[in-house]
Amino acid sequence: METEAGLELASVGRALRLFTRALRLHCPHCGRGPVLDHLITLRVKCGTCGLRLQRGEHDAFTGSMFVLFTLVGLVNYAFLAITLLVTDVVPWDLLEYGLPTLTLALVVVGFPFSKLLWLAFDLMLRPVTAAELTWHQAAEVEFEVDLLGSRRESIDRLAMPHVAGDARTETARKDTAR
Ligand SMILES: [Zn+2]
C-alpha cells in the first residue's frame, strides 16, 4: 500500500514534536507506546495506535541504518576532537581501544533510536492517513508489501507453467500494480 498523502513539509513545531517523541523512545505518530519489545528491540507495532514501526516497508531498515551510522560517526568525531583539544600527546591507546568500544556500544544502544528517528523523518514528510493507519492495524506481518508480491508471483507460476520466467514476473508485477 502506498501512502495516499503526497510529500509535504512539516512545520518546525510538528517536526520537533516527532523527533522529540522518537528520542524519548515513544511512538513518533501518537507520542505513546510501548514501542520496545526488549531493551533494544522494537515491537512490530506501536502498542497504542497500531502503526507499524517500520511502516511495512523494507527500506525503512536502510534509512534507519543511515541515521544510526551518521550519528555514530558524528559522536566519534566529536569525541576525537575534544580529546585532541584537551591533550598535547596523542592518546593512541584511547584511539585504538576507546573509539572502537564506543562505536560498538553506540551501535547497540542507538539501534531503537535510529529506527524511531527514521520513522519520525518519514512521518514528517509523509503523514499517516486514516486509511493507512487502518491498514497497519489490520496487518499481521511486518512487511506486507513484498510478501503479497511474492505470493502473487508464486500463484501465477502455478497457474501458468508454460509461461517463461520473465513474462511471469512481469504479469505478477502488473497484477500487484492493479
Ligand atoms: Zn503510536
Image: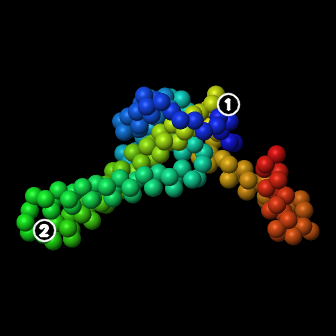
Distance from the alpha carbon under mark 1 to that under mark 2: 56 Å
Q: Which mark is residue 7?
A: none
Q: Is residue 105 visible?
A: no
Q: Position of residue 123 (x, y in %)?
A: 53, 37
The secondary structure type at the circle numbered 1 is: helix
Near-viewer residue (29 or 43): 29
Tell me if the residue at label 1 has its CB under 8 Å from ligand 1.
no
Mark 2 burial class by Cα count in 10 Å: few <14, some 14-19, many 20+: few
Colour scheme in the image?
A: rainbow
The tag earlier along the polypeptide, 1 or 2, is 2
- Which residue is labeled 2 in the image? 91
Residue 126, compared with residue 92, is above or below; it is: above
At horizontal 85% and vertical 65% (from top left) the residue drawn is: 167
Q: Position of residue 37 (x, y in %)?
A: 44, 42
Q: Is residue 111 visible?
A: yes
At horizontal 15% and vertical 71% (from top left) the residue drawn is: 92
The kind of residue tagged 1 is Ala
Residue 167, compared with residue 43, is above or below; it is: below
Q: Residue furthest left?
A: 88
* Quarter of the rendering occupied by the C terminus: top right
Residue 80 picture quarter: bottom left
- The nearer-to-camera label among 1 and 2 is 2
Near-viewer residue (99 or 161): 99
Q: Which mark is residue 131?
A: 1
The kind of residue tagged 2 is Pro
Near-viewer residue (16 or 144): 16
Q: Position of residue 55 (x, y in %)?
A: 57, 42
Near-viewer residue (161 or 111): 111
At horizontal 15% and vertical 62% (from top left) the residue drawn is: 84
* Quarter of the rendering occupied by the N terminus: top right
Q: Position of residue 83 (x, y in %)?
A: 15, 60
Q: Is residue 167 left or right of residue 1?
A: right
